[in-house]
Amino acid sequence: MMARSWSHLVCAALLALIALCVLWEGWLAPLRPGGSWLVLKVLPLLPAVPGALRGRRYTSQCLSMLSLPYFIEGAWRCGDADIVGMLARGEIVLAVGLYIAAIGHARAAAPPPQKRE
């Protein structure tokens, strides 16, 4: 039961991080007016969506590592002015949330340890 709750958190954080990145670089505050190629930064996250929706443990293990570059980017850009700084802080929150949820799901979904005889 606990693994399912963690899995739902992984899905929510992953989809929210994808949405934030697309909105950020596509419309809200793109690097260049009219949109930016930086919207492609969501591509590494997209293959993880089906596995996350199915609650796969291996996907959560991968997402725990994959969330770190998004945290770094948010930390790098959070000092910017106006909306960019706010979006970067949102990216930090979502990346940390994804990391914690992915670790929690991977631990909760782990098989029980074998007994030694």
Image (spheres, rainbow, N blue to C red):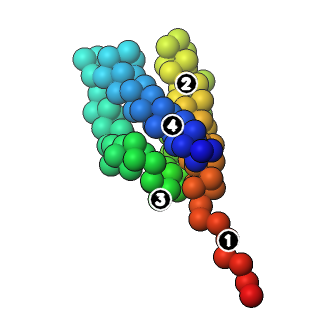
Q: Secondary structure at mark 4?
A: helix
Circle nearer the viewer, 2 or 3: 3
The residue identified by callout 3 is 58
Residue lying at 34% horizontally and 46% vertically, measured from the top left:
50
Question: What is the distance, in whole Å, between disc 2 and disc 1 at their CAs?
Answer: 37 Å
Task: From the top left corner, tell me how far across and down residue 66 is, in percent.
Answer: 48, 50
Q: Nearer the viewer, residue 36 or 92?
A: 92
Image point 53% across, 11% down: which residue?
82
Q: Position of residue 2 (x, y in %)?
A: 62, 44
Residue identifier under label 4: 8
**Marked residue nearer the N-terminal end (3 or 4):** 4
Quadrant, the N terminus:
top right
Q: Is residue 76 above or below residue 87?
A: below
Please say if 48 is above or below 114: above
Q: Quadrant of residue 117?
A: bottom right
Q: Percent x, y for residue 45?
A: 38, 44
